[in-house]
Image: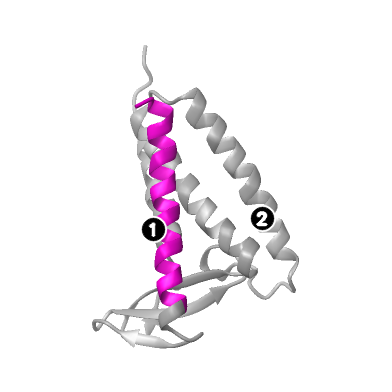
Amino acid sequence: MMPILRWFGISAVVVVLDLYTKHLVQNAFLYGELLKVTSFFDLVRYHNTGAAFSFLANAGGWQKWFFTVITSVAVIVITYLIRKHHQEKLFCWGLALVLGGAIGNLYDRLTLGYVVDFLNFHINDLYWPAFNVADSAICVGVGLLLLDSFKKPNS
Protein backbone atom coordinates (compact mmCIF):
# COMPACT_ATOMS: atom_id res chain seq x y z
CA MET A 1 0.00 0.00 0.00
CA MET A 2 1.28 3.45 -0.82
CA PRO A 3 2.36 5.24 2.36
CA ILE A 4 0.12 8.21 1.59
CA LEU A 5 -2.98 6.01 1.36
CA ARG A 6 -2.13 4.45 4.73
CA TRP A 7 -2.32 7.87 6.39
CA PHE A 8 -5.60 8.77 4.73
CA GLY A 9 -6.91 5.31 5.65
CA ILE A 10 -6.21 6.03 9.33
CA SER A 11 -8.10 9.32 8.97
CA ALA A 12 -11.01 7.49 7.33
CA VAL A 13 -11.18 4.96 10.20
CA VAL A 14 -11.35 7.85 12.70
CA VAL A 15 -14.16 9.50 10.70
CA VAL A 16 -16.15 6.26 10.47
CA LEU A 17 -15.75 5.46 14.20
CA ASP A 18 -16.62 9.03 15.14
CA LEU A 19 -19.73 9.27 13.00
CA TYR A 20 -20.90 5.77 13.96
CA THR A 21 -20.58 6.40 17.70
CA LYS A 22 -22.36 9.77 17.35
CA HIS A 23 -25.13 8.01 15.39
CA LEU A 24 -25.52 5.45 18.18
CA VAL A 25 -25.74 8.17 20.81
CA GLN A 26 -28.25 10.21 18.80
CA ASN A 27 -30.49 7.15 18.44
CA ALA A 28 -30.17 6.06 22.07
CA PHE A 29 -30.32 9.37 23.98
CA LEU A 30 -32.43 12.48 24.04
CA TYR A 31 -30.55 15.78 24.28
CA GLY A 32 -29.17 16.15 27.81
CA GLU A 33 -29.96 12.56 28.78
CA LEU A 34 -27.28 10.90 30.90
CA LEU A 35 -26.38 7.27 31.61
CA LYS A 36 -24.09 6.71 34.58
CA VAL A 37 -21.55 4.05 33.57
CA THR A 38 -19.05 4.27 36.46
CA SER A 39 -18.45 6.58 39.40
CA PHE A 40 -16.32 8.79 37.13
CA PHE A 41 -17.79 8.31 33.63
CA ASP A 42 -21.19 8.96 32.07
CA LEU A 43 -22.57 8.69 28.57
CA VAL A 44 -24.52 11.81 27.63
CA ARG A 45 -25.87 13.59 24.61
CA TYR A 46 -24.78 17.19 24.32
CA HIS A 47 -24.68 19.52 21.33
CA ASN A 48 -21.63 21.76 21.07
CA THR A 49 -22.08 24.78 18.79
CA GLY A 50 -18.63 26.07 19.68
CA ALA A 51 -15.13 24.66 19.46
CA ALA A 52 -13.14 22.64 21.98
CA PHE A 53 -14.64 22.78 25.47
CA SER A 54 -17.60 24.76 24.06
CA PHE A 55 -15.43 27.79 23.27
CA LEU A 56 -17.72 30.44 21.66
CA ALA A 57 -20.73 28.12 21.97
CA ASN A 58 -23.03 31.04 22.80
CA ALA A 59 -21.66 33.48 20.20
CA GLY A 60 -24.89 33.83 18.23
CA GLY A 61 -24.34 31.50 15.26
CA TRP A 62 -21.49 33.12 13.33
CA GLN A 63 -19.07 30.67 14.96
CA LYS A 64 -20.46 27.77 12.88
CA TRP A 65 -19.11 29.33 9.69
CA PHE A 66 -15.94 30.56 11.37
CA PHE A 67 -15.07 27.06 12.59
CA THR A 68 -16.12 25.56 9.25
CA VAL A 69 -13.65 27.82 7.41
CA ILE A 70 -10.86 27.21 9.94
CA THR A 71 -11.40 23.44 9.79
CA SER A 72 -11.54 23.43 5.98
CA VAL A 73 -8.23 25.30 5.79
CA ALA A 74 -6.74 22.89 8.35
CA VAL A 75 -7.89 19.89 6.27
CA ILE A 76 -6.16 21.34 3.19
CA VAL A 77 -2.93 22.11 5.08
CA ILE A 78 -2.85 18.71 6.79
CA THR A 79 -3.46 16.93 3.50
CA TYR A 80 -0.57 18.85 1.96
CA LEU A 81 1.71 18.02 4.92
CA ILE A 82 0.87 14.31 4.76
CA ARG A 83 1.61 14.24 1.03
CA LYS A 84 4.90 16.10 1.52
CA HIS A 85 6.12 14.18 4.59
CA HIS A 86 4.49 10.78 4.05
CA GLN A 87 7.67 8.93 5.07
CA GLU A 88 7.75 10.49 8.56
CA LYS A 89 5.74 7.98 10.57
CA LEU A 90 5.17 9.70 13.90
CA PHE A 91 4.45 13.05 12.25
CA CYS A 92 1.96 11.49 9.83
CA TRP A 93 0.26 9.41 12.52
CA GLY A 94 -0.39 12.65 14.38
CA LEU A 95 -1.59 14.43 11.25
CA ALA A 96 -3.82 11.52 10.23
CA LEU A 97 -5.54 11.46 13.63
CA VAL A 98 -6.05 15.23 13.63
CA LEU A 99 -7.36 15.10 10.06
CA GLY A 100 -9.86 12.34 10.85
CA GLY A 101 -11.09 14.14 13.94
CA ALA A 102 -11.38 17.45 12.14
CA ILE A 103 -13.40 15.89 9.31
CA GLY A 104 -15.69 14.06 11.77
CA ASN A 105 -16.54 17.24 13.64
CA LEU A 106 -16.78 19.27 10.43
CA TYR A 107 -19.37 16.82 9.10
CA ASP A 108 -21.49 17.33 12.22
CA ARG A 109 -21.13 21.10 12.07
CA LEU A 110 -22.21 21.21 8.41
CA THR A 111 -25.08 18.70 8.63
CA LEU A 112 -26.41 19.37 12.14
CA GLY A 113 -25.17 22.86 13.00
CA TYR A 114 -23.45 21.51 16.12
CA VAL A 115 -21.09 18.73 17.17
CA VAL A 116 -22.44 15.76 19.14
CA ASP A 117 -20.46 15.14 22.35
CA PHE A 118 -21.13 12.14 24.57
CA LEU A 119 -18.11 11.07 26.64
CA ASN A 120 -18.36 12.70 30.06
CA PHE A 121 -15.67 12.18 32.71
CA HIS A 122 -15.82 13.62 36.22
CA ILE A 123 -14.54 13.41 39.76
CA ASN A 124 -17.49 13.86 42.11
CA ASP A 125 -19.09 17.14 40.97
CA LEU A 126 -16.06 18.32 38.94
CA TYR A 127 -16.84 17.60 35.29
CA TRP A 128 -14.52 17.66 32.30
CA PRO A 129 -16.35 19.04 29.25
CA ALA A 130 -18.02 16.26 27.27
CA PHE A 131 -16.22 15.17 24.11
CA ASN A 132 -16.35 12.56 21.34
CA VAL A 133 -14.16 10.18 19.31
CA ALA A 134 -13.09 12.99 16.94
CA ASP A 135 -11.96 15.15 19.86
CA SER A 136 -10.04 12.19 21.29
CA ALA A 137 -8.28 11.57 17.97
CA ILE A 138 -7.38 15.25 17.69
CA CYS A 139 -5.90 15.28 21.21
CA VAL A 140 -3.88 12.10 20.66
CA GLY A 141 -2.77 13.41 17.24
CA VAL A 142 -1.59 16.71 18.70
CA GLY A 143 0.25 14.77 21.40
CA LEU A 144 2.03 12.74 18.72
CA LEU A 145 2.90 15.92 16.83
CA LEU A 146 4.35 17.42 20.01
CA LEU A 147 6.33 14.25 20.64
CA ASP A 148 7.57 14.34 17.05
CA SER A 149 8.73 17.93 17.50
CA PHE A 150 11.25 16.76 20.12
CA LYS A 151 12.95 14.33 17.71
CA LYS A 152 16.46 15.22 16.72
CA PRO A 153 16.62 16.51 13.15
CA ASN A 154 18.34 14.29 10.59
CA SER A 155 21.87 15.55 10.02
| The stretch drawn in magenta includes residue 92 | no
Q: Quadrant of the C terminus?
A: top left
Residue highlighted by disc 1: 17
Residue at the location (47% across, 71% down)?
117
**Viewed as shown, does residue 109 lie left or right of 94?**
right
Residue at the location (54% across, 59% down)?
105
Q: Is residue 142 visible?
A: no
**Viewed as shown, does residue 103 lie left or right of 38?**
right
In the rendered image, residue 64, in percent from the top left (x then y), is placed at 69, 64
Query: Which region shows up in magenta?
Result: 1-26
**Viewed as shown, does residue 153 lie left or right of 52?**
left
In the rendered image, residue 25, in percent from the top left (x then y), is placed at 42, 76
Is the residue marked by circle 1 packed among few (<14), some (14-19), or many (20+) residues within 10 Å?
A: some
- The first of marks 1 and 2 along the sequence is 1
Q: Amino acid at mark 2?
A: Thr
Marks 1 and 2, how far apart in space?
Answer: 21 Å
Residue highlighted by disc 2: 68
Residue 3 placement: quadrant: top left
